[in-house]
Amino acid sequence: MRIDLHTHSSASDGTDPPAEVMRRARVAGVDVVALTDHDTVAGHDEARRSRPPGLTFVPGMELSCRVDGRSLHLLAYLFDPAHPGLAAEGEKIRGDRVRRARVMVAKLAALGADLTWDQVAAIAGEGVVGRPHIARAMAEAGVISDPADAFTTAWIGDGGRAYEDKYALEPAEAISLVHAAGGVSVLAHPGTPGYEVPDEVIARLAAAGLAGVEVWHPEQSQAERDRARRLADELGLVATGGSDDHGALTGYRIGAESTPPEAWQHLAAQASGTPVS
């Protein structure tokens, strides 16, 4: 059984609509797939309606958090999307994402980049706007040759000339909100470049109610996988895996990493919000 607990659609910064993400998941031989768009559940209804026979859909979201001045992503699953506290924070994050993106576009223009907000908005469409949309707009405008080139200090990488921070949750607060909404939380890719999370921070989050840690991720080295697995064992966390697929941006890699069936069962047993479908 292949279980991919980390994918994105055009509801945030993936390139494909939720229906296409579901189709590709089944074609890739995935049996259980979570849609975890950034700070939104907007793609869930389409994903449910369009899932092919034999594919189990897991409602999820990747929440923007910050700890010690650095970004941290929290994967949330099986929560009630109508929970007032969680819904309000999601709306606040999404609103600030727009402000942030506009500021970054203005900074890029000041640096001489031939780029407008309308170009970025056209690519984002109705999805939650993020840096990948700006990167794609920069590539289309000829400012850079490839969207990946935008994520440097020369442009919109962390600390870059056109970078701007956004509102994000304190992770312990996010874990508490997800739990109150009946869901479970998993720390996303804690060993990938730019999102490294120290052992002591993971231990604090485990004490705050974190349910799992993402061990198997395409951009996480074997050393970081080993570290995450060790911490999961020591702290009693569920070890999960996912492709973090963003469609064309990541090379259509749904199913590239998988969560063990027993780990998924243990994770799902802790939730009491929205069930799988």
Image (cartoon, rainbow, N blue to C red):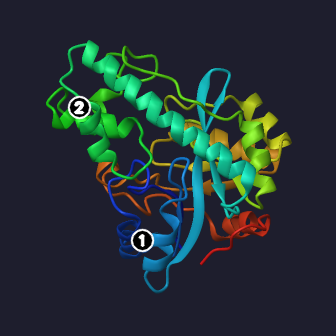
Snapshot quadrant of residue 60: bottom right
Vertical position of residue 118 compared to residue 42: above or below? above
Q: Mark 2 and mark 1 in contact (Cβ < 8 Å)?
A: no
Check disc 2 and report the residue beneath it. 138
User: Which residue is at the far right?
Assistant: 207
Q: Residue at x 74, y 30 (%)?
A: 201
Label ID, residue 195:
none
What is the tally of numbered marks visible in this picture? 2
Q: Residue at x 85, y 41 (%)?
A: 207
Q: Residue at x 32, y 34 (%)?
A: 134
Label ID, residue 22:
1
Of the residues shown, which amino acid type is indicated by label 2? Met
- In the picture, the quarter occupied by the C terminus is bottom right
* Left or right: residue 121 compared with residue 57: left
Whether residue 252 can be seen here: yes
From the top left corner, tell me how far across and down residue 13 is, in percent.
40, 47
- Viewer-side residue, 123 vs 272: 123
Q: Residue at x 44, y 63 (%)?
A: 255
